[in-house]
Structure formats: structure tokens, C-alpha cells
Amino acid sequence: MAKYRVTVFTGDYIVRQLTANRERCDVYIEQHFDAKLNDRESDADNYCSVLVAHNASPRSKAIAKTYAAKCAKATGLPNAGVRQVAYGKHGDGNMRHTMMPAVLLESLFISDMSQAEFASSEAGQEMLAQLIVDTVVEHFPDGCHVALSAGHRGQTSKNDPGAPAANGRWEGDLAVQVVAKAAALFRKLDTEAVANA
Ligand SMILES: [Zn+2]
């Protein structure tokens, strides 16, 4: 029977990763949201994407690809797929120290009001949490130790709320809520597995 163990890591990003390595976690997932902060940016602001580190393994990329596809399907947003970031660029330091597959979820654009409202709602957060669970279960059907990390909040050396959302919320706070819901879902999965054993 599949068994899932989950640990939510806080502290500075490097500490989270090194601790996850020490605890021999099997997969590392950090929740963020994208935001368009500059009106001059020509990029679209309505897609799902997942970042992987400059040194990402094929496994990391495969997990990222799965999540991006699931997120796009569930939200109806375009799938921008997997983006491998260059050494030292945005997001690389959040993942490059892990020994296990690691992905950084940029699930929606919270600079857009409707996506911000969705990411702030109970139903939206539950859905985003379920996407994390479904992605992990697909890649680790026999169970695993999941490392979860909420982007921005919880760092020891700085107070970082992340990007502002269109509805007045902050990226970091929404990420904390989604991660907490995902952790609860993993624990529920584990309980049910035990109950059915
Ligand atoms: Zn972020």
C-alpha cells in the first residue's frame, strides 16, 4: 500500500534544501505564483509554468511537465510548460542544492484579478493542492517522502512577501496556504492507506 510522508520546510532556501537532502526526501516541490509586475512587459500573463534548476535531472523535468499539464487542464489556462533557468537566475537557488528531483511551481498569474481571486479562494487552493498530490502520486505510485516549501515566506534572513496579488493578497501568503492544504491531503492519503491496509 502506498505510503506518503510529507514535510513542510521553512527557513532560508538553502537550509530547506540541505535539510531535505539530509532527510532523504524523494521529491521537492516549492509553490509560487507568477505575476506580471511591469506594464511594459509584453509577455502574456495567463499561463501555467514550472521552473527547474540549471542542473535539473530528467526526472525533475518530467515531474515539472506533468504538473504544468495538469495545472493548465484544471485551470483552463495555456500551458507554458517547463522552463529550465540558468545558473544563478530567478528560481535556480531555490532548487539547485537538492539531491532529489525539484520543481518550482508558477501556477497562475496573481497580477490578474480573476487568477488572484481563484488562488485566494478555498476551492482554488484545494484544487491547486490536489494538483501537487496528483503529480506526486503519478510519479511515485509506491509512496515517497515529499518535501514541500512555500515560496518567499518563512525565510530566516529576510522578510519576503513575494509578489503582490491584484486583490491585495501576497504571493507568499497564498503559497503558504496551498502548501498547508497539500500537506493535509498527503496526510489524509497516508491515513487512508493505513486504514485500508
Ligand atoms: Zn515567487
Image (tube, helix red, strand yellow):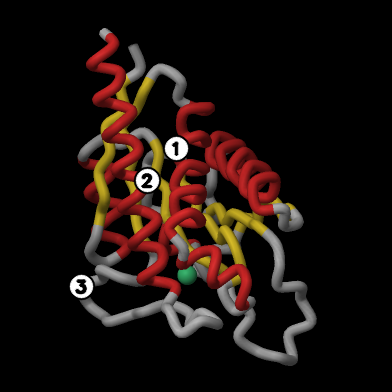
- The image shows residue 20 at horizontal and vertical percentages of 27, 45
Q: Which residue is mark 3?
A: 156
Q: Is residue 108 above or below residue 35?
A: above
- Name the N-terminal-most of marks 3 and 1: 1
Q: Give the quadrant of residue 150.
A: bottom left
Q: Residue at x 60, y 68 (%)?
A: 115
- The image shows residue 124 at horizontal and vertical percentages of 51, 56
Q: Is residue 11 left or right of residue 59?
A: left
In space, the residues marked 3 and 1 are separated at their CA atoms by 27 Å
Q: Amino acid at mark 3?
A: Thr
- The image shows residue 44 at horizontal and vertical percentages of 76, 73
The label on residue 133 is: 1
The answer to the question of whether label 1 and label 2 lie on touching residues, with beta carbons closer than 8 A, is yes
Q: Give the quadrant of residue 155.
A: bottom left
Q: Residue at x 50, y 48 (%)?
A: 127
Q: Is residue 63 above or below residue 41?
A: above
Tag 3 secondary structure: loop
In space, the residues marked 2 and 3 are separated at their CA atoms by 23 Å
- Indicate which label's residue lies in the foreground, 2 or 3: 2
